[in-house]
Image (tube, helix red, strand yellow):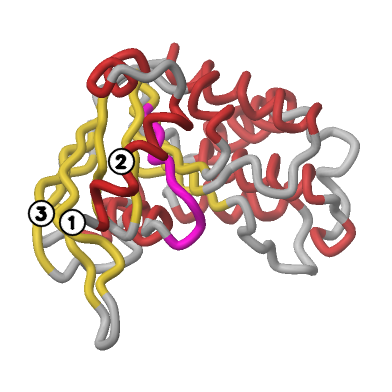
Amino acid sequence: MIEAKDLSKSYPTTTAVQGVSIHVRPGEVVGVVGPHGAGKTTLLRMLAGLLAPSSGEANVAGVSTATQPFRIKSRVGFVSGDQPLPPHPTPRELLIQQAQLQGLSQEVMERRLEDLINTFEMERFAALPCATLTAEQRQRTNLACAFMKDPAVLILDEPTHSLDMLSSRFLHITIRAAREAGLSVLLSSSALGDAESLCDRVVLLHRGRVLDQGTIPEVCGHIGVRSLSDAFLWHLPQLSA
């Protein structure tokens, strides 16, 4: 579960996120949709416990971002589309490191390690240095590391970034499986197609502010348009008025 109320993040020269309130229930996929620079990454990093909000509050997987952000990191699987990997370790070694950080027993670690390598089809490259991996292989490795935590919440920042069509399809399957397993899934995307095919609800974000949120039929129905792109474009003049 994710519950955020009036989250804001300000810097000396700009405000990246302004008073955002959202919620994500278990077994639900919610997409934060907007152009580059809308504040999506800032919002998701605050909810993942990686960035302190300037104001507002959030509860993620039963933990407050204000008082225990370090505990959120152990309960949330966070993956960014351009997230780098250290060059020298192999994916298998990174998964073992993640298991050790979680304090897993040797038996549980070995079982989960093999399950994840099979699930994310990493057999061909699990023993290769990360510096040699393709963008798709790096993304699969990052996802596997996120699932090694056995998270209650999955936060994905532009997860299809740098992925080709086949790799994006695999990611979509992974997200749907996470939803079926009861995880709360929050993702960001500047591609409306991802939101339309994956999300139970969407949050339209622009210049750090929420334009509208709800199911896609609700967001479109609020203003009498047929597509998510039309809904987003309709709101822009209202925002600047």
The amino acid at mark 2 is His
Query: Quarter of the image holding residue 55?
Result: bottom left
- Left or right placement of residue 113 versus residue 151 in this view: right
Q: How many marks?
A: 3
Q: Position of residue 12 (x, y in %)?
A: 25, 87
Crowding around mark 2 (Cα neighbors within 10 Å: few <14, some 14 to 19, many 20+) is some
Q: Is residue 221 above or below residue 70?
A: above
Q: Nearer the viewer, mark 3 or mark 1?
A: 3
* N-terminal-most mark, 3 or 2: 3
Which residue appears at 81% of the width and 43% of the height? Answer: 126
Q: Position of residue 167 (x, y in %)?
A: 76, 32
**Secondary structure found at label 3:** strand
**Secondary structure found at label 2:** helix
Whether 217 is among the magenta residues is: no
Q: Are marks 3 and 2 in contact (CB under 8 Å)?
A: no
- Left or right placement of residue 98 versus residue 241 in this view: right
* N-terminal-most mark, 1 or 2: 1
The amino acid at mark 1 is Thr
Name the residue that disc number 1 marks. Answer: 65
Name the residue that disc number 2 marks. Answer: 235
Q: Position of residue 192 (x, y in %)?
A: 53, 33
Which residue appears at 41% of the width and 39% of the height? Answer: 233
Q: Is residue 145 above or below residue 234?
A: below
Q: Is residue 29 above or below residue 97?
A: above
Task: Give the distance between the C-alpha atoms of the residues marked 3 and 1, in whole angstroms.
Answer: 7 Å
Q: Position of residue 163 (x, y in %)?
A: 75, 41
Q: In the rendered structure, which segment of residues is drawn in magenta?
A: 30-37
Residue 229: mark = none
Name the residue that disc number 3 marks. Answer: 57
Q: Are marks 3 and 1 in contact (CB under 8 Å)?
A: yes
Relative depth, front residue between 209 and 51: 209
**Secondary structure found at label 1:** loop
